Amino acid sequence: MSGTTSKTLQSTHVDPAPGTSHCQLTMHRTERGIDLGTTTPETCAAYCGQNGSFKGLYLSVDPMCTQGTIQETLEQASNGDARPGIIKTITERCMKTLPYSSIAALRLELAAAYDREGDQANCLSALSPYVADAARSDDEITQGMTGAAADEITGIMEVVRSMLDRCERRSPPGSVGR
């Protein structure tokens, strides 16, 4: 797709794909990002397929949340060089703009950092969003998902379950776990 955007970011003209009509997108800056819509939904649908759409709020990405920063943090964490505080800050600030797998990787590294420090309560807390899914079978979790999505989730859950076990093994008796 190609086109031009107005300087005020109010709209963009998209050059039609062969065999399609003119597609007009609308863009409005918000505090959180760019709200994208269209004045020609039928013609713009040719660019998205049957179940797709451009419409939605496209969030601004915090400089801390760029792939380079995330990758660098994960590499430092896997070497034991990243402190839990920075991983926690990145995880909290980037949750809305990073894919599920990236957030899971950060949470797993955060849990591992806490585990290395012997802080099992925070180790478990870092993984708390995954506890309910980790207790379910892979088939239950992935019901209705595409093969690729199911493979990604089951891979993540395998590592999450292992890390939860590590956190729980070192937790003092009577602490809350899965």
Image (tube, helix red, strand yellow):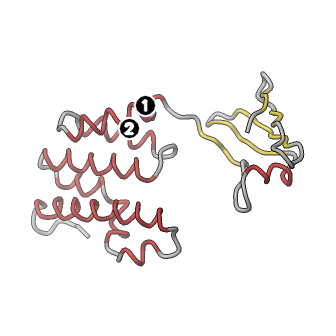
Give how far across and how far down residue 102 sits, in percent: 40, 47
For the point 78% across and 24% down, the residue is 8
Alpha carbon separation for disc pair 2 and 1: 7 Å
User: Label 2, on which residue?
Assistant: 90
- Residue farthest along the top direction in this orientation: 7
Q: Is residue 78 above or below residue 8?
A: below
Give residue 105's mark. Answer: none
Give how far across and how far down residue 154 sits, in percent: 36, 66
Give how far across and how far down residue 22 sits, in percent: 88, 42
For the point 13% across and 46% down, the residue is 116
User: Label 1, on which residue?
Assistant: 64
Q: Is residue 155 above or below residue 99?
A: below
Amino acid type at circle 2 is Ile
Query: Is 147 left, or right, of 167 in this rendering?
Result: right
Task: Check disc 2 and report its element: helix, strand or loop.
Answer: helix
Q: Residues within 10 Å of mark 1 (few under 14, many from 20)?
A: some
Frontmost residue, 13 versus 36: 13
- Residue farthest along the right direction in this orientation: 21
Please identify the quadrant where the C terminus is shown.
bottom left
